[in-house]
Image: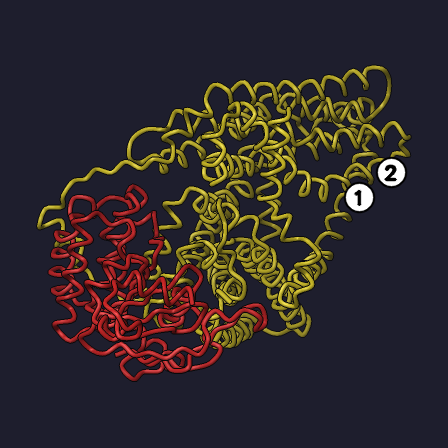
Amino acid sequence: MREIIALTKISLINGFNLHGLSFKNLKQIKQIWKPIIFIFVIAALIPAYLLYLNFLETVNVSFIKLNQSGYFIALSYNVISLLIFIFGLTYIMAYFYFSRETEIFLPLPVKQRNIVISKFIVILVYEYIIDFIFLIPVFLINGINTGANVAYYIMSLISLLIIPIAPLALSAIVMMLIMKYTNIGGKKDLIRVISMFLSLFIILGIQIIIQKQFTNIDVGQEDFFLKLLTDNKMLINKLGYTNPLAKWLGTSLMLENVGSVINFIIFILANILFFGLFVFTGEKVYLGGIIGGNEVISKKKQLTKNEFDKKVSKINKPYMSIFKTDWTILIKTPIYLLNCVSTVILIPFILIIMPIIVGDFSSSLGALKELYEPNIQYINYGIAGVLMLFGAMNPTAVTTFSREGRYLWLSRIIPVSPKDQIIGRSLSPLILQALLVIILLVGINFIVPIEVSTIIIGGGLGLAGSVPIILSGILIDIQKPKLKWTNPQRAVKQNLNVLVAMAVGLLITLILGLVTYFMFNSNLNYIIIAVVNLIIITVLSIILYRILLTRIEKRFVEIED
Amino acid sequence: MLKIQNLSKTYSNGSIKAVDNINFEVRPGEIFGFLGPNGAGKTTTIKMIVGLLRPDSGKILIKDIDNQEEMIEAKKQISYVPDNPEVFEKLKGIEYLNFIADVYGVNAEDRKERINHYLEVFSLDKAVNDLISSYSHGMKQKIVLIGALIHEPDLFILDEPMVGLDPKSSFNLKEIMRKRCSEGKSVFFSTHVLEVAEKLCDRIAIINKGKIIAQGTMEQLRALEGQEQSLEQIFLELTEQ
């Protein structure tokens, strides 16, 4: 226990930069900007959070009216546990395997088990910060609307602390097994990333299959609503087939009888069991995945004359060289691949493919077509807006300098003009946005055959609109790149710049959305609206580009000051 | 080739003078050594020359190009090898070298010939197609050195260049430095290894607590102390004063 506490304390201080948060640091004028920016970002996200609260209230009231109050908690747990599991995979990979702390801990005379437990606790603390923001309102809203008693709130508080454990433990188990059994050959990183995606799709696939098999609700059946109104656990029981923990939590917080308390105890025990399995797995396989896990195979094979000539003959323009280097590092670093590139595949999968597989679209297809065709103009702009929002959420542009970390000195000394730096660094996020546009439009086309105008306006504006968002991301990062990181995850995830860029991207999208709305209200032709949007995007991009030209030159020299 | 005029750099709102009004010059065809104890201001000076830090005052002229006014032009004249060779670990050696050749505008023929030559000199020909993350510290140092040499810079700047290099590579690097100087190019490097500086450098400057306390040829430095002494003895006496 003493070892666990010591390791966890060091990891928390280092991981959250606790000394850097001291008031003494803030007294320096230069450091004052950090809390100001943080407050600004929080303020910018408040409207979105209020929308989220409103959404929760609406859904909760709906479920209560349908006599399915417990389902609200169960469903919320199901969603959050899935998200914790998915994102947990990258946190575990980064923190358990690619953090420099691990290299410091391993030679110490501490038990392997204690290292994994302390690392788990650190990630858990990080999860708590995120989960509390999203889960506290779930419990509060449900409690207020159902007139819950003190016991409910006490159990809710305990649940908040327990909820991340099982999904995070499962993430850790999956990741530790992948890292142990893919510790082979020269393509280790690639194998691991593929394995991670495979595990993700397998687990999601299992959920989907079970859900389809056991939750075949024919909403058209006459007695469906009768069953809903008479059996207050109908939906929660069906959910329980795919996620029994969701069922136990949901039913326990209904606080109907002794059974609720028993379910709560089972929920807690299940989480303890998952944690125990994680510790057991960690003891057996963690070292095997990590020792030699970061070794890179060198073939030491001399290139033949032809091979050498081929590799050095191709000359690239400086911006192309910057782009190729950036793209290579993005693809070859598992953390960056998962955080920046994989979202291009995951978002369309979660938004489109999963509902197609899970839902019964045959009856809905006609309704969707009826919705699409007469409202195509609005839907086109809606798609453009959604694509721009997803572009704002992608951290590739806003971490372009942060991802280089301690290598940034090289970019700063080479004779490459700011213009080439901007172009070179914009290409990776632009390509990713283009991929997202293509995948999403192809996916939508499977549900409802889309028209050319959707491709041009929805896709075209969605791509064009990402340009100012990308440029603003690069500008944000050059102002204060996060360079001193021991774990590449910190460059892309624990980076305030990413939040700031999201807020700015949201603002740009909102402004364009408002302008579009007013133009529609003024009965302007939708092609003119598209042209006006394009002009605004172009002007904004030119302004941001010009600002970047001078900022990059200035900041490259100032960064170390 | 390189003129440093009244160069100063302070930290913590002026309370710490890392470099205090220094002046020196590196002439064409000369190897110039920059010596000093830890924390004297060597790396700070070098970083200002290569554009990693902005001076508070003073001028840095590289082939008469002010590196604060015409940064890109100034950078084209130099190359820099830091003391800690951190480079993109996810690139292969050959990819890194191509990247450097691209940004410095080295044509295909020249880059083929030069990369081949330096890979052989530094015995990296078998490892160049491997990821840099598989390299040892010394190999990383070498790949950065090769990268710094392939565009044939007029001013070659190195910070502690011998650290991490094996004896053969150290010897080869010294030979490269001498050859470059015989062609009219210049080398400017900082080092703690005084024997190397004594044997290799045409002129030396010693910096201590941000100020240049001595500069000149070995003979001129010996004349300062008025007796025949090794550089080590001169250095220790001057820095202890």
Instruction: Tell me where residue B68 appears, x and y as whole percent.
Output: 40, 79
Identify the secondary structure beneath mark 2: helix
Place residue A223 in its image quadrant: top right
Q: CA distance from mark 2 to mark 1?
A: 9 Å
* Kind of residue indicated by mark 2: Asn
* Kind of residue indicated by mark 1: Glu
Identify the secondary structure beneath mark 1: helix
Q: Which residue is mark 2?
A: A145
Identify the chain of the residue marked 1, using the numbered disc in the image.
Answer: A
Viewed as shown, does residue A265 lie left or right of B126? right
Residue in the image at 14% along x and 60% along y = B175
Front-lying residue, B236 or A78: B236
Residue in the image at 60% along x and 19% along y = A276
Front-lying residue, A267 or B200: B200
Chain letter, red: B
Front-lying residue, A560 or A299: A560
Chain letter, yellow: A
Give the numbered dot on residue A57: 1
Give the numbered dot on residue B107: none
